[in-house]
Image (cartoon, helix red, strand yellow):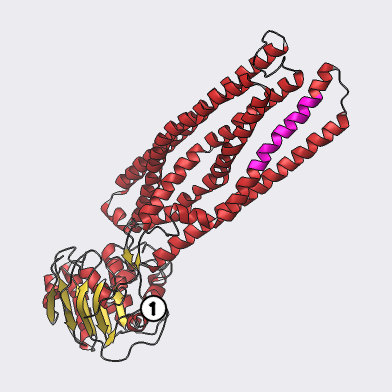
Amino acid sequence: MTSTTPNTIANDTDSPVSRAGLMAAGAAQHRRASVLSVASGLLWPVQAAVVAYALGGLLTGQTVFALGIAIAFAGLGLLRAGLTMASEAYAQAAAQTIIHRARAHIVAVEARRAADSPFGGAGAITALASEKLDLLVPFITRYAPARARVMVVPLVILMLALSQSWAVALVLMISGPLIPIFMALIGLAAKETSQKHLREIGNLNDMLVERLSALVDIRLLGARDAVLDGFSGQATDLRHRTMAVLRVAFLSSTVLELFAAIGVAMVAVYVGFSLLGTLGFGTWSGALTPQVGIFLLLLTPEFYQPLRDLSAAWHDKAAADAVFDELHTWDAQQTAVLMGQGGVCAPLTGAPSIALRGCALQNGIVLADIEIAAGESVAIMGPSGAGKTTALRLMAGLEGPNVGQITLAGVALTDATADAWRARVGWMPQAPHFLNASVRHNVQLGRAGDLSAALEHAAVESVINRLPQGLNTRLGETGGGLSGGEARRVTLARAIFAQPDVIIADEPTADLDRKTADAVTNGLLAQVARGATVIVATHDPDLAAKMDRIISIEASQ
């Protein structure tokens, strides 16, 4: 016995979609954006000094070179605008780099999964890779630069204010720290609210995909009103969650504006009364001059501006935290990776026998050894969750076991041999999947074969005849227009169309009436008659009884 450890999709500290991994992808651009943003913020004290010098000189009767002052102020303003634009460009580039990396990784992983994702349905994964990832853009372009400015600009302004007036510096020192304290308290509620909002988005997407795939059944069951009520309820929940997020965002902005307004008002009152001579304290020496007073008045709003920007982007951080948590949850879902490259290649030679020895699955289930000879028909039975579907996937060469060895046509299953083995296999999954194309194309897939015989053996001819355009009817990715049992029979026709040496079918008679199930059974027996190896997983005792033998699988850990 040999042991193999197949590649698995799992979370680790070096994951490309972890917070650290994603931020590292745009680290250089993000660093440039932060530096330029801080530099832009630090130019305002220089502009304020120029304005204070000019206005103070006019008030005190000093000679002021107006043209030089105007040129200096305009030049600094243009430089500041240029730095801001460059910072925004780098931040946007960092966001696009990070989003592209995350989206490409999600698509690549989902395309290589050997089984459906445990994270959720197609709607949930699509929502994660599209609209939810887009929620990271404001976090990267607004919150991250604002956080960099908060760490530098207010401290510089505080030092400048302290150098001129300890009273103004005291006002800033008292009012400034209150803002991040309240922001942190609000942030706890904001993250929880954003997580609930993201869950509602995923739930609504999943519901939409599921209902679209079941339109025929909904119409036949007369469940239109119930489905509409379900959509209405889900949309109402999403609307409530959205309003909750907005309430938190407005609350955070209101708290910031309150403290900022109080701080600016206190400084303005102090400067005004000091210039009137009413207050004679608060400076290091002498009375407050007009130049210094104007300088302090111009500095104070800019002391709070980085905090304003951070507050405006605070709910962006909460939303991003929720997205990172979802990415972590998605990344932690372990599934086997599809073996091989998924390409077309020459089939394996040799009799199509199958042998599973000492195989253990990722969920801890251990399979008994199985050997199936070429040309044999076998029914695999057992309780739900015992590993029947996974055993079929192992036999089809779609995935490998955690431990054990699989021999197919006398050759060990590896990434190098998986595609060649699958070239001899017709696969019918339990959950039908279709291309957004016609029935004809979905059955043929560009291969040569007998289309009429395949439809007959799958007992699907009558279904095709009822479709609006017959074989040319476009199914759509969800098999729109077909019921669950009809869609399963179309996938069975696809599996047997090219007359493969091995046919592996998962629950081929599920959701069928007895007459149709017997027709499908006879179609499978016709494949055995021509020499094909037929393996089915089933709960149908009638189908199992007509196979050469039955293999029972019991769940064991």
Is residue 476 visible in the rendered image? The answer is no
**As shown in the figure, which amino acid type bears the numbered disc 1?**
Gln
Label tally:
1
Q: Residue at x 45, y 59 (%)?
A: 16
Q: Residue at x 48, y 42 (%)?
A: 317
Q: Residue furthest bottom?
A: 350
Q: Is residue 17 above or below residue 81?
A: below
The quadrant of the rendering that contains the C terminus is bottom left
The image position of residue 48, as x and y in percent, is 73, 30
The image position of residue 115, as x and y in percent, is 32, 66
Of residue 230 and residue 27, the one placed in the foreground of this image is: 27
Q: Quadrant of residue 50?
A: top right
The reply to whether the magenta stretch includes residue 527 is no
Q: Is residue 288 above or below residue 133?
A: above
The image position of residue 128, as x and y in percent, is 43, 53
Magenta stretch: dominant secondary structure? helix
Q: Is residue 319 above or below residue 3?
A: above
Secondary element under disc 1, as helix, strand or loop, is helix
Is residue 286 visible in the rendered image? The answer is yes
Q: Is residue 362 above or below residue 4?
A: above
**Along the horizontal axis of the image, is 521 left or right of 27?**
left
Which range is magenta? 38-54
Label 1 belongs to which residue? 444
Q: Quadrant of residue 280?
A: top right
Of residue 515 and residue 64, the one placed in the foreground of this image is: 64
The quadrant of the rendering that contains the N terminus is bottom left
